Amino acid sequence: MNLSNFEEWIDDKILKRGLEYFNKGKVISLKTTDGSHFKARIDGSDVYNVEMFLSGDVVINIYCDCPYNGSYCKHKAASLFALKNGEFSSNEESKVTPAAPSKVGLQPVLLNLQKEELISLILNITEEYPEIEKRLLYQYETSEDEIASSKKLIRDYINGAKRKGFIDWRHVNQALQGAELTLQKAREKLENGDTEGAILLSIAVLSPVVKMLDYSDDSNGSVGTIINWAIQTIDDAVTRGLDNLHEKEQKKLFEVIMKEALKEYLSGWSDWRYDLLKICTYFCHQGELRTKLEKQLDALKQQVNHSFDKKEIKLLQLQIIEKCDGESAAERFIYDNVNHSEFREKAISYEFNKGNCEKVIQLCLQGEIADQHYRGLVHKWQEFRYKAYEIVGDIENQRKLAKELLLKDNFTYFEKLKGLYSLEEWEPILQELLEEFEKEKYPSSTHLSILKVENLKEKILLYCKKRTSSISDLYPYVIKDYFDDVNDIFITYIQRISEEASDRRGYRSVCAVIKTHKKALGTLHSHKLIKELREKHNRRPAFLDELGKIK
C-alpha cells in the first residue's frame, strides 16, 4: 500500500482508533536512520513497538508486537498517521508529540535483569512459542550457508501455511513470514555495505514466493508486495554498491541476476522478469556485460509474441543506449520505434526540450491516428498537442481542441477555453457547449460542473428533474429560487426509492434522504412526507421502525 492513501487499506474502526491515538500523543517516538526503516513506540495498554519498511512512498511491511491478530492494529494505524504527517526524526530521543505519562516499557525491565535471568526468560518464552525460537535462531545464526538456511526458512513457513495444498487469504501473511525475515536480513546487509549478501538473500526469496501465486489467494496483494520488496532491495543494493565492487565482483552479480531473470518460473510474470533485466543494465558500462545482455535481449525478443513484451525489451535496449552511447544515439533509437506509445512520448519530450512545437504537433496527430482505438492514448496526445498550441500562441486550434476535450468530459479545459474568448464572445459558445452536452444519453460530470460554475440555476433544476437522485447534492444551488420545485423533486425521489426498498438497509438509505430533505426544506415538510409514507407502507414494520428514528 502507499503511504499517501493507507487509510483505504485499514478497517474504519481501527483507523479511527489509530487516529485517536495519534491525536492524543500516544505515539511516543518515531525514528529512522536510513529513511526506509522506521521504528515507533506507542503508548497503549502497554508500550508497543512498531516497525515499518518503506520503499519510496510504498509501505512494504509493517510489524507490531501487540497481541492483536488482525492485519492492522490501532498501533500500526497511529504510526502510519505519524509517518504521513512527517513527524519522525533520526534522533533516538526525539518525541513525536507530548505523550501522556506512560507505563514502564519492556526495555528498562530487561536491562535490569541479570544475564542468567534473561537467558532463562528467553528459553521459557521460546518453549511456549516455538515461532520466536525459529526467528531468533535465524536472526543470530552464524551458519556459513546462509542462503540455504534462508531458503529452508521460507519453504517451512510456506508449507506450514498450506491447507490441502492451498493457502487461503487468511494464511498468506503467515506463509510469507520466512520471506519477510530473509528480506529484513537482506536490508541489514545492504545498510552494512554487504552488496552481494543483500542481493543473494533477496534472490533467494523470489522463486518460492512467485510460485506461491499458483496455489494461494493473494487478494490482499501481500505476495506481490514481498516480490516487489525483494526486487527493490536488489535494485538498491546494485545502485548503492556498484561503484565499490571490482569488475570481477560486478560480473559475478550480473550473471546471478540475469540468470534469475531468465528462469522458467518468471515466464508468466514478465513484469518482474523485466524489472530484473533492467537492473542488469546498470552493469553495461562493462563492454563484455553489455554484449551479453544485448544478445540475451535479442534472443528473448525472438521468443515472445506479445506486443507488450517486445515493447519492454525495446525499452531495456534504449536504457542501455542511453547509459552507454549518449543522447544522439538514444534519440535515433526512439524515432526508429516511435510507433510504440512510450517511445512516442519520449520523442515528444525531446522535441519540447528543443522548442520544436511543430514537430510535437506532428507526432501527436500521427499518434492520434495510430492509437485511435485507445481512448487514453488519444487523450494524452491531444493534451500534448494543446500544450504545443499554447506555446506557439495558436488561439484558433486551442479553442477547437479545448472544446473537443471538454466534450470528452475533461473539465480542466473549461477555464482554458473560457479564457480564450471575450465576455461578449463567450455567451454563444457556452450555449453551444450546453446543447452538445444535453444531447448525450448519459449525464456528464463536466456538464454538471459547468452548470455549477456558471451558476445556471434553471438548468440545474432541469438536470435534477431528469435525474431526481441528484437533488440530495444539488438542492443548495436552487432551493432559494425554486423551493416548491425542490420539494416536489425530493418527494418524487423518496417515494420511488421507498417503493424499491425491500430490507432494513434499503429503508435506512431512504431515511438518510429524508433527513437531507428535512435539512433542506424544514421539519414541517419532512413530517408531512413521513406521515404519508407511514400510511402507505403500514405493512412494513422495519420501514416504520426506521422512520420512527428520524428526529
Image: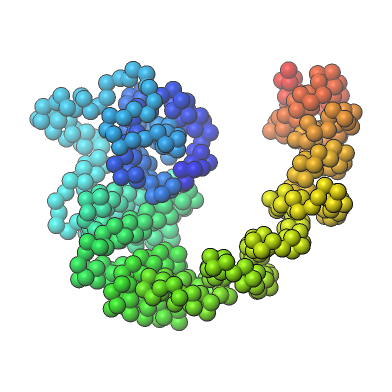
Quadrant location of residue 152? bottom left
- Picture quarter with the C terminus: top right
Residue 543 lies left or right of residue 162; in this view the side is: right
Residue 45 lies left or right of residue 189; in this view the side is: right
Residue that appears at 34% across and 62% down: 207
The x and y percentages for residue 274 are 42, 67
Return the residue nearer the eye: 176 or 468.
Answer: 468
Residue 168 lies left or right of residue 119; in this view the side is: right
Residue that appears at 14% across and 26% down: 113
The x and y percentages for residue 169 are 45, 48
Residue that appears at 85% across and 52% down: 425
Return the residue nearer the eye: 26 or 529.
Answer: 26
The x and y percentages for residue 88 are 36, 35
Return the residue nearer the eye: 216 or 182.
Answer: 182
Query: How many marks overall?
Result: 0
The x and y percentages for residue 313 are 45, 73
Instruction: Let me know if residue 276 appears in the view.
Output: yes
Quadrant location of residue 339? bottom right
Would you place residue 480 above or below residue 301 in this image?
above
Instruction: Let me know if residue 185 appears in the view.
Output: no
Would you place residue 30 above or below residue 272 in this image?
above
Residue that appears at 85% across and 22% down: 525
Would you place residue 183 above or below residue 493 in this image?
below
Quadrant location of residue 402? bottom right
Residue 405 lies left or right of residue 367; in this view the side is: right
- The colour mode here is rainbow
